[in-house]
Image (cartoon, helix red, strand yellow):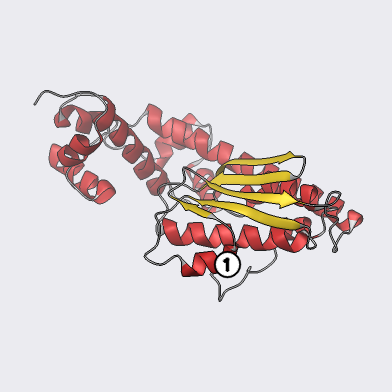
Amino acid sequence: TRELGAGPEETVTLAVRYAPDFAGALEATARYMHIVCDVTDVEARIAGQDASLAFRLPDALVCVDQMTDRMMSKVHARLMRIGGGRVELSLAEIARKEPASRDLHDAHYAAPIQFGASRNRLVFRVSGEGAPNPYRDDDLFAALCDLNRRRLDDRRRAEDFIALVSDAISARISAPDLTVADVARTLAMSSRGLQRRLAERDLTFHGLHEGVRRRMAADLLALTDLPMSEIAYRLGFSAVGNFSRAARRWFGCPPSEWRQANAVVPRDE
């Protein structure tokens, strides 16, 4: 992360770069960062001289510690650049386990660090009157914010479509021979049209079907005491063995073992 630096500047970073002041940069980061990275629970707070930005990354990310370090360092570096020397980081809360050595983190943030946080959060202290941005350009900022608003709307529409397809799959998940044609017909689309729209989002019907099955399997295992045969039937598997092999692929262990470790419903010894 240190060697790569802040990375290329896309439309969100450029909007932040030309914000009128630190507060504007912080708010633009919170509003638009979902465009360029998969984050949730994004929150910016400004109260007098105190300001903070918080966000979460999905638990399912591969190499989540490395991704957390990357995202936190990029956001920190870009916001500090806007501060014009009037912004100081007072605390970094990082949602990852503490590394064997903290030296690189301490050197990068030069502020107290709390590892193992429930979400990532940067807390700043702003001196002066609003910390004017030395790179301020009101016209560019307005144009880039308008572009990012449209990009965000496009992304939300795409996510709405994926949710619609996922719901259609869920409604017929028990069918052992569920096909793209079945789901397309439910949505009043052609099979080719559905596949094309999924491909535009780098997705496939098989991948969505697999994802819905995995999420429903996790819920049924953790939240019910249904036998494996019933869960397999409800998820459209023709045999319990097929479900067991799929569960091993999804969870890295047999479904009975995953249930024992994650069960919410109390079970008799």
Residue under label 1, please give it. Answer: 108
Q: Is residue 226 above or below residue 15?
A: above
Q: Percent position (x, y) of residue 88?
A: 70, 57
Who's the residue at 47% across and 69% down the image?
A: 103
Q: Percent position (x, y) of residue 50?
A: 71, 44
Q: Is mark 1 on a helix, strand or loop?
A: helix
**Label 1: few (<14), some (14–19) or many (≥20) C-alpha neighbours in 10 Å:** few
Asked where in the image residue 210 lies, by quadrant, the reply is top left
Report the side of 202 relative to 30 (left or right): left
Mark yes or no: residue 145 visible. yes
Report the side of 162 relative to 134 (left or right): left
Who's the residue at 56% across and 58% down the image?
A: 71
Q: Percent position (x, y) of residue 29?
A: 69, 50
Query: Which amino acid does the dot numbered 1 rest on?
Result: His
Report the side of 133 relative to 257 (left or right): right
Between residue 52 and residue 177, name the one nearer to us: 52
Asked where in the image residue 78 lies, by quadrant, the reply is bottom right
Q: Residue furthest bottom?
A: 3
Which quarter of the rendering shows the C terminus? top left
